[in-house]
Amino acid sequence: FPNPFDESINVNFNLNTSGTFSINIFDDLGKLVTQRNNVAGLGGFNTASIDTEQLSKGTYTLQIVFRDDRKAIKVIKIK
């Protein structure tokens, strides 16, 4: 995905098994600003696109939640 990003962000990741996952985006104060819940994913490589046009320019934390596993990365919105 592009990082920094603009109007949308594509999240690429691997899942060990098929199941549902969630993607959360938090602002720099820790407030949840965008989320996608119960997204179906297959075992292996997955891609999810998130519209971020409504977000202001700044730094965010993108979190992927799959069962009990949580991964987070910092991302930057440039426009």
Image (cartoon, rainbow, N blue to C red):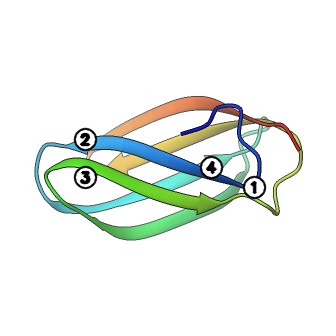
Q: Which residue is mark 4?
A: 25
Q: Which residue is at 44% across, 57% downward? A: 48
Callout 3 environment at 10 Å: few (<14), some (14 to 19), or many (20+)? few
Does dot 3 land on a helix, a strand or a loop?
Answer: loop
Q: Which mark is residue 7?
A: 1
Q: Which residue is at 33% across, 41% downward? A: 13
User: Which badge, 2 or 3, is on the more N-terminal residue?
Assistant: 2
Does dot 2 land on a helix, a strand or a loop?
Answer: strand
Q: Amino acid at mark 1?
A: Glu
Residue 53 percent coordinates (x, y): 79, 61
How far apart marks 1 and 3 lie (CA) works out to 28 Å
3 left or right of 10 in image: right
User: Which badge, 2 or 4, is on the more N-terminal residue?
Assistant: 2
How far apart marks 1 and 2 lie (CA) works out to 24 Å
Q: Which residue is mark 2?
A: 14
User: Which badge, 1 or 2, is on the more N-terminal residue?
Assistant: 1
Closer mark to the observer between disc 2 and disc 3 = 2
Closer mark to the observer between disc 3 and disc 4 = 4
Q: Nearer the viewer, residue 59 or 3?
A: 3
Q: Amino acid at mark 2?
A: Asn
Q: Amino acid at mark 3?
A: Arg
Does dot 4 land on a helix, a strand or a loop?
Answer: strand
Which corner quadrant of the image does residue 58 belong to? Answer: top right
How far apart marks 3 and 4 lie (CA) works out to 17 Å
- Vertical placement of 10 versus 75: above or below? below
Residue 5 percent coordinates (x, y): 71, 40
User: Which badge, 4 or 1, is on the more N-terminal residue?
Assistant: 1
Q: Which residue is mark 3?
A: 67
Q: Amino acid at mark 4?
A: Ile
Q: Which mark is residue 56?
A: none
Callout 1 environment at 10 Å: few (<14), some (14 to 19), or many (20+)? few
